[in-house]
Each structure stands twice: as C-alpha cells, then as structure tokens.
Image (cartoon, rainbow, N blue to C red):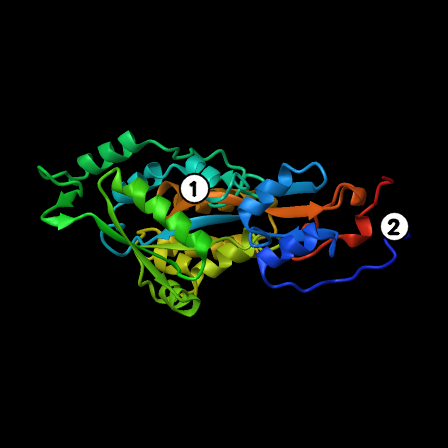
Amino acid sequence: GEKPAIKKITFNVIPDPTTRAVAFETGDIDLLYGNEGLLPLDTFARFSQNPAYHTQLSQPIETVMLALNTAKAPTNELAVREALNYAVNKKSLIDNALYGTQQVADTLFAPSVPYANLGLKPRQYDPQKAKALLEKAGWTLPAGKDIREKNGQPLRIELSFIGTDALSKSMAEIIQADMRQIGADVSLIGEEESSIYARQRDGRFGMIFHRTWGAPYDPHAFLSSMRVPSHADFQAQQGLADKPLIDKEIGEVLATHDETQRQALYRDILTRLHDEAVYLPISYISMMVVSKPELGNIPYAPIATEIPFEQIKPVKP
C-alpha cells in the first residue's frame, strides 16, 4: 500500500484547553484535533483570524439538544413543547456563546446522518408564534405579571445541566432569557455530572441537556437506547401515547434486512419524535482542527474519536 507521508508522531496529553492553546502558540505542538471541548471557543475564533494558523470545522458530527419531559407538567403539553422550540434564538446563541463554531440544528439528527434527511419542517425562531401557541392552550398572562399561568399554575420549567460545564451554563442562561420573553419561567439546575446523569435515568427533569453519539452510532444505536430507562430519551418520551409503537418500530428497524422497510421505519420514528417536539435541537457540533499550515488540509475520519494520520500529506512551505 501507499506509505504515509509522516514518519513520526508524538502525542502530548494536555488536559486543559487553555494550556493546549498556549502549547500550540509557542510551537510545542503542530496539530490540535477534537470536538468543541478542544479549545476555548473564543480562542478558536481568534486562531481562525490568524493567517499563520490553519483552522477547519468538519461537517456536523453530533447534535446538542434539550430533551423535554413529555410525562411531567407543563412539558407534558405539546403546545408548551412546541412553544419552547420557537422561543430560542439559536443563531444568536451560537454566535454569542459558541462564537459561530457550530451550526443551527433544526432536527434531532443532521440531514447528513444516514436515514435522517427527511425534510422535516424546522421550528425556526418565532417568539410571536410561541406566544400564540401558549395563548391558545390556555397559558395566559395575568395583568401586571410577566409569567404565564393556567388554572392558577405558573408556566415554570426546570432546565438541568452539568454545573461545572461553563459552556452549558452560558447556553442555559441564554435559553432561560429567551423563554422568559414568551412568559415561561425557567429555573436553572446546575449539578455535578453524576447527579445530572441520575436525573436523565429517572426522569427528574423538565428540560435537560442531551446530545447524540455521532458516527458510527447515529441513528441506529442512539435510537436503540431510547427503549431502556438509562438515558434521557426513554424518560422524555414516557408521556407519548405512541411510545410503545415507537419502541416497536425501533426494534423492527434494527432487525430488518429490507432497505425500503428500513427507510420507511426511520422516517416514521423520526417524524413522530419531531412532530411531538420531544427535543429542542440547538446545534450541530463539528470537529475542530488547528494546525500549522505546512501540514496541509487535515482529513477527517468517519468516527469522531479517530485521527487519520496516514492521510495527512504535508505541503512544502
């Protein structure tokens, strides 16, 4: 076979993102490759403006979203879940909190994911539509108040996230402010990682940060996990009348060898989840690369955890 152009690779394990950036700037390392945790995002944006550095963003690999609990009031109401989807200005969130390093997500999976390019109707930022949905569902604004009520109960929802994750906290605060504009009172629950995963497993959430798994696990393995109470998906879907049917179809789509049937089942499952607004997709995550220009264009592996060193072809300066 073809010999790789690079003879030797030295790995530096640097746990801290800021220290990684400094190591690159001082010339200690030639290549940084990873997901959104690779570098502080403002640092990546700064590197992108520097002609002495080469930066890249891949096609979407995973989705960051909120799972909305269909079994717990008030997100047990479809109108509330839909309104929350229309309430968030994702473009502004990505520009401000994520420095434009990710893409707006309209669906659970990016259209580039196998079987997921279905033309589902996006719920784009429309606070007036969100307010109209809530009004029609009986969530009205009492005189002199800015939080909606229905039968004397305020429109109050908890949003859970990992408290030590500064990025999640920043996103949660932006989402909280956006939802307040439509009359929803969002209380932020920032806890340690193990507590958040416990909430995902046992359904103690109104909204909770969640993400897909990327290649090679999306969509099949991710959908398979929806059938067991060990992830946010199972709990978020518990209030759906067609949850048993969704689980049955997931079992069928994983077992069938008929490609036409597989496509039809994926379409039905993903359409049901989208129409029921079980998720509030926020952004599609890309792999990030920062490298010395002499390494040339850095290829991406099909799996996010791999780096295709054998395909890197340095260019002559």
Mark 2 touching mark 1, by CB under 8 A?
A: no
Residue 243 in the image: state x and y as whole percent: 36, 54
The residues bearing labels 2 and 1 have C-alpha atoms spaced at a distance of 46 Å
User: Quarter holding the C terminus?
Assistant: top right
Is label 2 or label 1 in front?
A: 2
For disc 1, the marked residue is 271
Residue 248 visible in rendering: no
Assess disc 1: are there few (<14), some (14-19) or many (≥20) residues with their C-alpha within 10 Å of its C-alpha. some
User: Where does the image place residue 130, in percent across and percent down from the top left?
Assistant: 28, 35
- Residue at 41%, 65% in the rendered image: 197
Which residue is the site of mark 2?
5
Identify which amino acid the numbered label 1 is placed on: Thr
Q: Residue at x 16, y 49 (%)?
A: 154
Q: Quick check: can you spot residue 2? A: yes
Count of marks placed on residues: 2
| Residue found at x 73% / y 55% | 29
Residue 166, compared with residue 96, is above or below; it is: below
Q: Nearer the viewer, residue 111 or 94?
A: 94
Residue 187 shown left or right of residue 300 in the figure: left
Q: Earlier in the sequence, mark 2 or mark 1?
A: 2
Provide the secondary structure element on which disc 2 rests: loop
For disc 2, the neighbor class at 10 Å (few under 14, some 14 to 19, many from 20) is few
> Which residue, as the protein is rendered here, is positioned at the far front?
26
SS for dot 1 = helix
Q: Position of residue 295 (x, y in %)?
A: 79, 45
In the picture provided, is 142 more to the left or to the right than 31? Answer: left
Horizontally, is 275 left or right of 150 in the view?
right
Between 142 and 92, the one lying in front of the other is 92
Q: Is residue 50 above or below residue 253?
A: above
State left or right for residue 207 relative to residue 182: right
> Percent x, y for residue 153?
13, 50
